Amino acid sequence: MNKSDLLDGLRLEVGRAYDYALNHEDFIGRVSRAIFDGAMKNIVVIVYKADAEGQVSPVHLYGTKESLGKECMFGLGFSGMCGMKSSVFLKEGKKQTILMPVTNKNRLSYIFSLRISTDLYAITDQDLLFTEELANFIEAKGKLL
């Protein structure tokens, strides 16, 4: 499957996540599950929820037990950058991670961490554009739930 087809499939599944969501929390869980399933379970998806003080804690985790156990917490400096509403791409060896902030009323509400090995998939600008679209979709639809 080529990258465009994969990302289009993820867009469809994320749209369905909204259609079936019971509330905002359920919507976030369904979006993270849609990404994990749509990437054929070759990705680690961790969603962190930010509280009013900016502290983050994981609320949804998808991946293998081995890969989840190796997940490192990002620094608080990233939380401060989230006001820019831009995804950040990190690469260390074969690990690639996109950190995608989601805001609500100009306040950080969630951070999606999407990690995949370069052996399985090469992250490009197309993926970063997708995550920005995804964050905008979550923010817009989240207001309606």
Image (cartoon, rainbow, N blue to C red):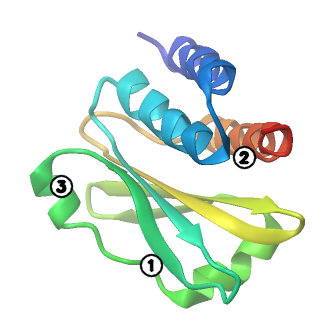
Task: Tell me if mark 1 has few (under 14), some (14-19) or many (20+) residues whose alpha carbon lies within 10 angstroms of its own.
Answer: few
Tell me if residue 27 comes above or below residue 72 in the rendering: above
Q: Is residue 58 left or right of residue 25?
A: left
**Residue at 68 percent of width and 19 percent of height:** 19
**Which residue is tagged 1?**
74
Q: Position of residue 17 (x, y in %)?
A: 59, 25
Q: Secondary structure at mark 3?
A: helix
User: Label 3, on which residue?
Assistant: 67
Q: Give the residue type at disc 3.
A: Ser
Instruction: Give, as a three-letter code, the residue at label 1.
Output: Phe
Residue at 89% x, 64% y is 105
Q: Quadrant of residue 54?
A: bottom right
What secondary structure is found at the residue carrying circle 1? loop
Q: Position of residue 93 (x, y in %)?
A: 27, 63
Task: Say which of 137 and 21 sits in front.
Answer: 21
Examine the rendered structure and indicate whether residue 62 appears above or below residue 42.
Answer: below
Give the vertical position of 138 relative to 74 (above or below): above
Say what amino acid the circle numbered 2 marks. Answer: Ala
Mark 2 sits on what residue? 135
Residue 124 on image: x %, y %: 56, 41
Q: Earlier in the sequence, mark 3 or mark 2?
A: 3
Q: Is residue 86 left or right of residue 12?
A: right
Q: Nearer the viewer, residue 52 or 33?
A: 52
Which of 19 and 131 lies nearest the eye of the viewer? 19
Of the image marks 3 and 1, the number of the one nearer the N terminus: 3
So how many labels did they put on this image? 3
SS at mark 2? helix
Residue at (55%, 22%) from the top-left corner?
A: 10
